[in-house]
Image (cartoon, rainbow, N blue to C red):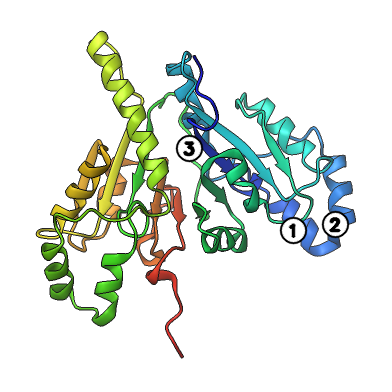
Amino acid sequence: MPFEIERKLVIGVASSALFDLTASHQVYLDSGPDEYRRYQERNLDVILNKGVAFPFIRRFLNINKVFPRHHPVEVVLLSRNSPETGLRVMRSIAHYGLDISRAAFITGQSPYTYLPAFNAALFLSANEQDVKSAIAANYPAGLVLPSKIVDDDDDIELRVAFDFDGVIADDESETIFKRNNDLSEFHAHETLHMAVPHQPGPLAEMFRKLSLMQKLEERAQRRDPDYKKVLRIAIITARNAPSHERVVTTLKSWGVSASETFFLGGMNKTRVLSIFKPHIFFDDQLTHLTSSPGGTIPMVHVPFGIANRRPPE
């Protein structure tokens, strides 16, 4: 039986993340909402180019093709457009064959307030204020940063990479480090608390449900040794020994795991990202979101916790 929406892994995506709306947005800025509406009506059948999140969303939706009985994932369009100006987006979705049928058009307002209504474990947008507002309201959200679009049709695998602190887990440990910028103090705290799981961070629920998909794939592979997995999850964290133990403790307490886990000890993450080649990478610190040469890794900033608070003046 298909999952009810309460049990599905639901992602809410803004049209600004799914498609390249650069030209449309410039019309809005230059000429206002009325000309923007006329522009969209004139270009109703002009298909929008793919946006930064498109390769990720396309492969994410393919999980339903792998598990047609369960249909465990869903994507909902959450848009600042009106239904009239959003028609071009919906026609572009249909053109690319994306299985997105639910949508919310909020007509100039931020759509993040409706995340609970759709049971969304993530809101992806290129609108910085919408993402910050969502995080401030304790909703899971990420800001899609500009990058080149690479979408290989022959690559059916979905690769998702996460930072740990401030993304999967809370920012407790980062707060300890930021207090004095003292790495030894951080390691001492984590060693003392290695048996104490972290509290969940903003994307913990998304990570948990993706981990469930991994377990479904493992079950499928046991039934059929020729089954080829389509999902790989990586945790790429600046932690190293001895603070790595608390990461393991936390994931074990949640009953989840990643396909690949990297404890880099402050090494540049792009050295691993350029090999793993994720279709999306989530990190809470902008300084870590420097892409590989050519800017082809889709980066998402999760503006959560101490790393994103302004220091007192």
Q: CB of mark 3 within 8 Å of CB of mark 2?
A: no
Left or right of 217 on screen, residue 59: right
Foreground mark, 1 or 3, reads: 3
Residue 231 visible somewhere in the drawing: no
Tell which circle, 3 or 2, labels the residue nearer the N-terminal end.
2
Tell which circle, 1 or 3, labels the residue nearer the N-terminal end.
1
Label 3 crowding class (10 Å Cα cut-off): few <14, some 14-19, many 20+? some
Residue type at numbered disc 3: Phe
Residue at position x 46%, y 53% in the image = 300
Left or right of 72 on screen, residue 79: right
> Eyeballing the image, is 296 above or below 230?
below
Q: Which residue is mark 3?
A: 56
Q: Which residue is mark 2?
A: 33
CA gap, disc 1 to disc 3? 25 Å
> Eyeballing the image, is 182 above or below 3?
below
Q: Position of residue 169 (x, y in %)?
A: 32, 55
CA gap, disc 3 to disc 2? 30 Å
| Mark 2 residue element | helix
Label 2 crowding class (10 Å Cα cut-off): few <14, some 14-19, many 20+? some
Q: Position of residue 3 (x, y in %)?
A: 50, 23
Residue type at numbered disc 1: Gln
* Count of numbered circles on the image: 3
CA gap, disc 1 to disc 2? 11 Å
Residue situated in front as seen by the camera: 178 or 125:
178
**Residue, far bottom:** 313
Residue at position x 15%, y 62% in the image = 193
Residue at position x 52%, y 33% in the image = 6
| Mark 1 residue element | helix
**Picture disc at residue 26:** 1
Residue type at numbered disc 2: Pro
Q: Position of residue 87 (x, y in %)?
A: 79, 36
